[in-house]
Amino acid sequence: AILAATEDTRFEPVKLEELPQIVFTIYILTQPCLVKDLKELDPKKFGIIVKSLPIKYEAVKDEEVIFNGFLPEKTGVLLPDLEGINTIEDQILIACQKAGIDPFSEDFLIYKFEVQKLKENEN
């Protein structure tokens, strides 16, 4: 969180005098599950993780492909229920864009997860 607030090149660093105006939100993610069919996805309910496959990836049984917590070279995460993301296709394209994956020429896996959202000053 500190690095995101001070060193994320997409945004200006947070200044000390801005801290009282900042509202913090924490997203607790469930264990990601491998998506076997795109019909399982719902961009309002599930976030997704896209992971590039190793160059020498050989087909394996679905149950052998698990999320082990290690991030490969290209990984993108997109939270659920984001404004302007209404379709599964949009969700996948944006997650791939964040990861630097070309969804039309690279193989990748999709995992889904749910979130519990905790916002400052909410019970």
Image (cartoon, grey):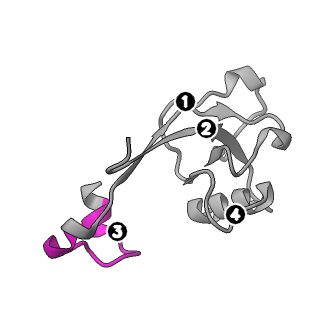
Q: Which residue is mark 4?
A: 85
Which of disc 1 and disc 4 is earlier in sequence? 1
Label 2 SS: strand
| Mark 4 residue crowding within 10 angstroms, few (<14) / some (14–19) / many (20+) | some
Amino acid type, residue under disc 1 in the picture: Gln
Q: Which residue is mark 3?
A: 8
How far apart marks 3 and 1 lie (CA) works out to 26 Å
Magenta highlight range: 4-19
Label 4 SS: loop
Which of disc 3 and disc 4 is earlier in sequence? 3
How far apart marks 3 and 2 lie (CA) works out to 24 Å
Location of residue 46 in the rendering, given as x and y in whole percent from the top left corner: 66, 43
Decide which of 119, 3 is in the foreground and name it: 119
Label 1 SS: loop
How far apart marks 4 and 3 lie (CA) works out to 23 Å
How far apart marks 4 and 1 lie (CA) works out to 22 Å
